[in-house]
Image: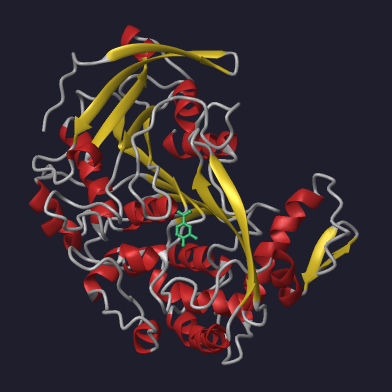
Amino acid sequence: MNFDEKKYVIKDLTLENETIRYRAFMNLVYVEKPVNPAYQQMHIFAPEIYYEGGQINGYKIDSAPVFMPNYVGGYMPGDLEEPAYSKFEPDKANTIFRALAHGYVVAVPAVRGRIQKDEKGLYNGKAPACIVDYKAAVRYLRHFAGEIPGDVNKIITNGTSAGGALSALMGTTGNHADYEPSLAALGAAMERDDVFGASCYCPIINLEHADMAYEWQFQGVNDYHRMNMHMNEGGRPSFTPVDGQMSEVQIKASGEEAALFPSYLNSLKLHDEEGNPLTLDEKGEGSFKEYMKKIVLASAQKVLDKGEDLSNKTWLSVENGIASDMDFEEYVRDITRMKTAPAFDDLTMDSPENDLFGNETTNCRHFTKYSRENSLAGGSMAEEITVKMMNPMYYVEEEGAATAKHFRIRHGERDRDTSLAVSAMLTLKLQNCGFDVDYHSPWDMPHAGDYDLEELFAWIDEICR
Ligand code: DHB
C-alpha cells in the first residue's frame, strides 16, 4: 500500500461547455493484502489549480472537502468511475465532474460486491465486504493525509440505494470494533474510518426489518409493477415492464409481515421534534403513521409553494395553497407496489439481499426469522453479526461507534424500492440521539440519486465552512 505524490496525470475535460483541469491519481490499491485487487483500489481527483496555489469557492489544496461517492447499486460490485458524461443521462456531466468543478477533491473507491469469487471459486464479495472496503479506503486517505489533496477531516460519503446504505453505514459505524477483524485481515491502514458527513439517497437499509415496513405501507395493494433493467450492448440501461398479482402465499406473507411492524417500530422508542412519542397500534395506526403523512405533505408543500398544480392527486387535500391532509392508503395505491412480499428476504431466496447475505460457499441465505421459518427454498440463515454489520440502525447509539456530525438523507416521494418508513426511522433515530440530519422526500421522485447536486453541494459547503 503506497501513495506516490509524483505519480499522476493531468487531464483537461470539457463537458456541457465547461472545462475542468484536474490531477488524477489512479488505481491506488487501498489495502496491504487485497483479495480482489481490481476492486480494492481507488481514484483520487483534485482540481489542478490547487497545485498552483489557486482556490475554487474558497477551498484550497489542504482545505477542500473530500467528496467520496461509491457506485454500488443492487449490492453489486461498485466500479471505479471518472469524470465523464453520466451513464444514465448521457448529455449531462456526472457527479464527479460536477464535484471537481465545484472545488471538491473526489475520492472514488471501487468496492467488492455480492457476485464476486476468488480463483478457487469461493465468494469473496458477500456482506460485509462492501462496507469493509469503503472503510479501508477511508483509512487509506487518512494514512496518507498531507500527501493526498484535501482535508481528511472533511470526508463526505455519497451513494444511492445500496450505495446510499453504504454511505449511511459509513456515517454511523465509524471505528467500530465489529469491522476490525475484516479490516485487519485485508491489511487496511491502522487509522480511523469515521467520516464527517454522509449523503444518502434512498438508502436500502435495515434489511431485516424492511419486509415488515414494506408491508405496513403496501399491504392491501396486491398488484405489482416494476421495470427490469439490463445493460444493452452499447452499455446503456434498457427496461422491460414486469406486472403481476401477488400469489396467495405472498398475500398471506404480506399480512403477517405487516403485523410484525408495530412492535419493531415501538421498540425504537422514537419521538418527533416536540418529544411526542411516535408509535403504532397493532393495526398499524398511530402517531408514527401521522408523522409519515407529514413527510409526504411537506413534500407536496414544497412544490405547491413553487406554484405546481396537484389537483390531480385525489388523495391530497389542499386548502388555500396548504397541503393539509392526505389519505395514506390512496397515496400508496397511487404510487403502486413494486415488490412482492416479503420484499427483501424472499421466500425463494431470489432477491439481491438474499444474495448479499450468502457466504464463501453459499450464494443465498435468509436473514429474517419470518422468511427462514417460511422458506420455500430450505435456505439457511446468515450470521447475526453479519446482518448487524449491514444495518446502521444498531450503531447510532452504540458505544465505540463514531457517528458523522452531519447527514443528508433523501428518499423520493414515489420511491417503492423500500418503504418510506425505512429512511424516516433512520432519520428519527439519528435526530433523537442529537445528530444533525437534513431530510426531505422530494415530490414525484422515484428511486434515484444525485438529482439535486446544487443543493447537495450547498449542504456540503455549509457544514464544511
Ligand atoms: C437497490 C434496489 C433495490 O430495490 C434493492 O432491493 C437493493 C438495491 C439498488 O438500486 O441499489
* Residue farthest along the right direction in this orientation: 320
Residue located at (41% from left, 50% from top): 163
Residue located at (18% from left, 39% from top): 37
Foreground of the two, 19 or 395: 19
Q: Is residue 449 above or below residue 202?
A: above
* Residue farthest along the top direction in this orientation: 52
Foreground of the two, 165 or 78: 78
Task: Answer with the quarter of the image where residue 154 lies.
Answer: top left
Residue located at (39% from left, 83% from top): 371
Foreground of the two, 46 or 339: 339
Q: Is residue 133 shown left or right of residue 335? A: left
Q: Is residue 293 above or below residue 435?
A: below
Q: Is residue 455 shown left or right of residue 64? A: right
Please, which colouring scheme is shown? secondary structure
Q: Could you tell me residue 30's position as x and y percent?
A: 18, 37
The answer to whether residue 427 is visible is yes
* Residue farthest along the front direction in this orientation: 233
Q: Could you tell me residue 336's position as x and y percent?
A: 68, 67
Q: Is residue 341 shown left or right of residue 305? A: left
Q: Could you tell me residue 170's position as x and y percent?
A: 33, 52
